[in-house]
Image (cartoon, helix red, strand yellow):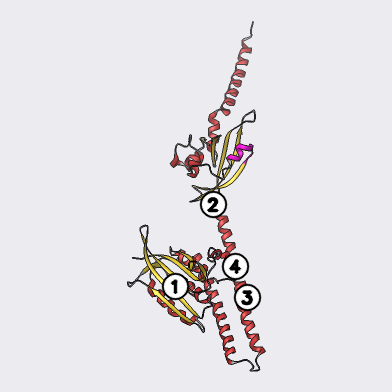
């Protein structure tokens, strides 16, 4: 006969075991999996072998909410707005070799990025080693990327100014020193007065070049750190004043300036630094010119770009010209810090930055299409002011 007391003792034990089994079943349930899945504060996207989205967590749903629902769509269509598989996709090599792969991806697209993500692909493997799909882990690294880009830009700017001043100022001071030594060598009056005048002019030119270099460095620093408000500028008047000053820059040469301006007053969106940009471009055609007669052709042409009224300003010269391989680099920092290039000074880099800051564009082409040695034509686009 069974003792009733023993039944009472066994019942609590059985209830405890049942509670443990339920608890164990709960922790193994899909509910817990989904809670963990959605609690992750990075993106998780599960894909099949054909890169179809099977499941995503809340982070991904929030990130790509305009594409709801995500499951059933191709990952590259949703995440990168592409019709074909992304060439940088880490899931493809993960599907091939069963290994983890990571890459940095711009979003929402490579063409128009507003941020960057670190994308890691993990292969999903069954108990027989067959790859069934991919788990993509998405980590937003936009803040880190922007901070790194900013730091890199600051370091490059520092090195740029250091190299520029050290290189260009060294050349200027060397030329002045050589000129003074030459005069001392002939201080016994065996030097003709004409030769002395030439040396004085050379020293004066180098001093002006040094002053211009320092001025351009200051202006370049301003344009990179201060966003000057757009104002209205009389383009024809600005050009007339700038061109009038050019005659004093020419030594022992004739300067001929041809102008093709519309009769009406022309206003553009710009600011006080635009005159400096135009002066630097015009000076380029004068300083880098080996002809006894320097010629400049200045032309203004109105045109329509989409719904915006614009002006095309062409500044052409008969100088030494710019080869095709140099045309793409003369506006860059790298070009102006290269000690092998011999530079065209800082003026063109400054000009591009100023014009770009005012919403314009600048490019350079041959004055005579078939032969770059016959001069350059700088083409500037500016927005017309009403």
On screen, residue 44 versus residue 177, left or right, reads: left
What element does badge 4 sit on? helix
Residue 7 is situated, as x and y percent measured from the top left of the image, at: 61, 12
**Closest to the observer, 189 or 166:** 189
**Closest to the observer, 375 or 314:** 375
CA gap, disc 4 and disc 3: 13 Å
Residue denoted by label 4 = 337
Q: Earlier in the sequence, mark 1 or mark 4?
A: 1
Q: Earlier in the sequence, mark 2 or mark 3?
A: 2
**Closest to the observer, 258 or 205:** 258
Q: Please state, as top left, top right, bottom left or bottom right, where the N terminus lies in the image.
A: top right
Residue denoted by label 2 = 143
What element does badge 1 sit on? helix
Q: For the view shown, which residue lies furthest in the top direction?
A: 1
Of marks 2 and 4, the one in the foreground = 4
The quadrant in which residue 39 appears is: top right
Magenta stretch mostly in which secondary structure? helix
Cβ–Cβ below 8 Å for labels 2 and 3? no
Q: Residues within 10 Å of mark 1 (few under 14, many from 20)?
A: some
Residue denoted by label 1 = 275
What element does badge 3 sit on? helix
Q: Earlier in the sequence, mark 4 or mark 3?
A: 3
Q: Residues within 10 Å of mark 3 (few under 14, many from 20)?
A: few
Q: Earlier in the sequence, mark 1 or mark 2?
A: 2
CA gap, disc 1 and disc 4: 24 Å
What element does badge 2 sit on? helix
For residue 96: magenta?
Answer: yes
Q: Residues within 10 Å of mark 4 (few under 14, many from 20)?
A: many
Residue 170 is situated, as x and y percent measured from the top left of the image, at: 62, 75
Residue denoted by label 3 = 170
CA gap, disc 1 and disc 3: 28 Å
């Amino acid at each position: 006969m069974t003792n009733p007391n023993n039944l009472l003792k066994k019942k609590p034990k059985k209830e405890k075991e049942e509670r443990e089994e339920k608890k164990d079943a709960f922790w193994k349930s899909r509910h817990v999996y989904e809670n963990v899945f959605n609690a992750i504060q990075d993106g998780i996207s599960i894909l099949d072998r054909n890169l179809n989205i099977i499941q995503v967590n809340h982070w991904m749903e929030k990130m790509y909410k305009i594409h709801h629902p995500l499951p059933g769509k191709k990952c590259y269509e949703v995440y990168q707005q592409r019709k074909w598989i992304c060439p940088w996709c880490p899931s493809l090599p993960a599907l091939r070799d069963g290994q983890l792969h990571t890459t940095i991806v711009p979003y929402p697209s490579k063409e128009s990025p507003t941020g960057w993500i670190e994308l890691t692909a993990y292969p999903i493997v069954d108990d027989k080693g067959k790859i069934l799909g991919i788990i993509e882990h998405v980590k937003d690294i936009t803040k880190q990327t922007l901070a790194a880009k900013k730091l890199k830009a600051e370091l490059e700017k520092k090195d740029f100014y250091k190299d520029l001043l050290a290189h260009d100022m060294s050349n200027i001071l060397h030329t002045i020193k050589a000129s003074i030594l030459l005069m001392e060598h002939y201080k016994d009056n065996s030097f003709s007065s004409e030769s002395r005048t030439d040396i004085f002019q050379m020293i004066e030119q180098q001093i002006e070049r040094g002053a211009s270099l320092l001025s351009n460095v200051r202006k370049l620093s301003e344009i990179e750190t201060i966003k000057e408000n757009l104002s209205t500028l009389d383009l024809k008047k600005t050009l007339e004043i700038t061109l009038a000053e050019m005659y004093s820059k020419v030594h022992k040469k004739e300067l001929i300036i041809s102008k093709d301006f519309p009769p009406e007053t022309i206003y553009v969106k710009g600011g006080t630094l635009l005159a400096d940009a135009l002066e630097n471009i015009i000076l380029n055609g004068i300083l880098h010119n080996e002809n006894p007669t320097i010629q400049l052709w200045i032309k203004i042409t109105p045109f329509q770009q989409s719904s915006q009224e614009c002006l095309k300003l062409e500044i052409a010269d008969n100088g030494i010209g710019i080869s095709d391989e140099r045309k793409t680099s003369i506006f860059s920092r790298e070009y102006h810090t290269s000690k092998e290039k011999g530079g065209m000074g800082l003026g063109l880099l400054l000009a591009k930055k100023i014009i770009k800051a005012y919403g314009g564009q600048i490019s350079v082409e041959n004055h005579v299409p078939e032969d770059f040695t016959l001069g350059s034509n700088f083409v500037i686009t500016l927005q017309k002011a009403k």
